[in-house]
Amino acid sequence: MPRGRPPEGPPEHAYEPTRFDAAPLPWRVPAMTSAYMLAAVLVGMLVSTQPALNGMLGRAMGSYTSATLISVGVAFLSAIVLALVMGRGDFSRSALGSVPWYVYLAGVAGMLFVAGGAIIAPVTGAFAFFVCIVAGQLLGAMLADHFGAFGLAVREVSPQRIAGLVLVIAGALLVHRG
């Protein structure tokens, strides 16, 4: 075969599709995607402990805002270690100045999540807290999609999306009453 040209036809060991491969099945997920999804579930399980732990710290310190400060401080130090291990990226003034100012509000959102968890989860319980968090995230995401906020493609609100949100809110009410 001449150099630089692709081989003609599939190699002998090529995968031969079967009739089951004709249409992609909704439950088939590539292995790498599955690994990331599993990692997200594990991170989610770890994050679910955060409000209770911050609540414990807040009660011990006599201040939920102080517990938030400690938690966010530990997160900051952990992020520094992560950046050193994984690669720090571009912290130049031009890179940081290239994004809109509101991008930095993500840090405020993170702090509000930590503080809210420390204050709210001891009252509602972790499960109800997270169901309400997910309901709020879905509502916010649906509005962000609808308006194309933050550079997202516009995905208009549909009856199916509203029904999904209503089911999550109903789940939050069931959890609260259970």
Image (cartoon, helix red, strand yellow):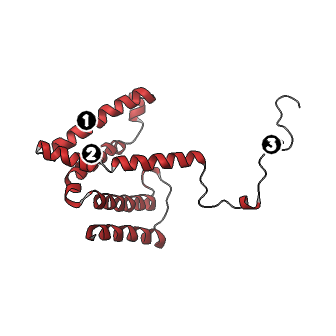
Q: Which quadrant does the N terminus fall into?
A: top right
Give the amino acid type for the residue marked by disc 1 in the picture: Gly
Cα–Cα span, label 2 and label 3: 53 Å
Query: Would you name the residue on which mark 2 appears?
Result: 111
Front position in the image: 143 or 2:
2
Badge number at residue 13: 3
Residue in view at x 77 percent, y 48 percent: 15
Residue in view at x 69 percent, y 61 percent: 23
Q: Residue 52: x percent and y percent?
A: 24, 50
Q: Residues within 10 Å of mark 1 (few under 14, many from 20)?
A: few
Q: Residue 43: x percent and y percent?
A: 40, 46
Q: Which quadrant does the C terminus fall into?
A: bottom left
Element on which disc 1 rests: helix
Residue 88 visible: no
Residue in view at x 83 percent, y 44 percent: 10
Element on which disc 3 rests: loop
Query: For residue 7, which quarter of the picture?
Result: top right
Q: Is residue 147 left or right of residue 72?
A: right
Which circle's residue, 1 or 2, is located before the other in the chain?
Answer: 1
Query: Would you name the residue on which mark 1 appears?
Result: 73
Residue in view at x 24 percent, y 46 percent: 53
Front position in the image: 89 or 123:
123
Q: Are marks 2 and 3 in contact (CB under 8 Å)?
A: no
Residue 60 visible: yes
Give the amino acid type for the residue marked by disc 2 in the picture: Met
Element on which disc 2 rests: helix
- Callout in the foreground (1, 2): 1
Give the amino acid type for the residue marked by disc 3 in the picture: His
Q: Is residue 176 left or right of residue 82?
A: left
- Callout in the foreground (2, 3): 3
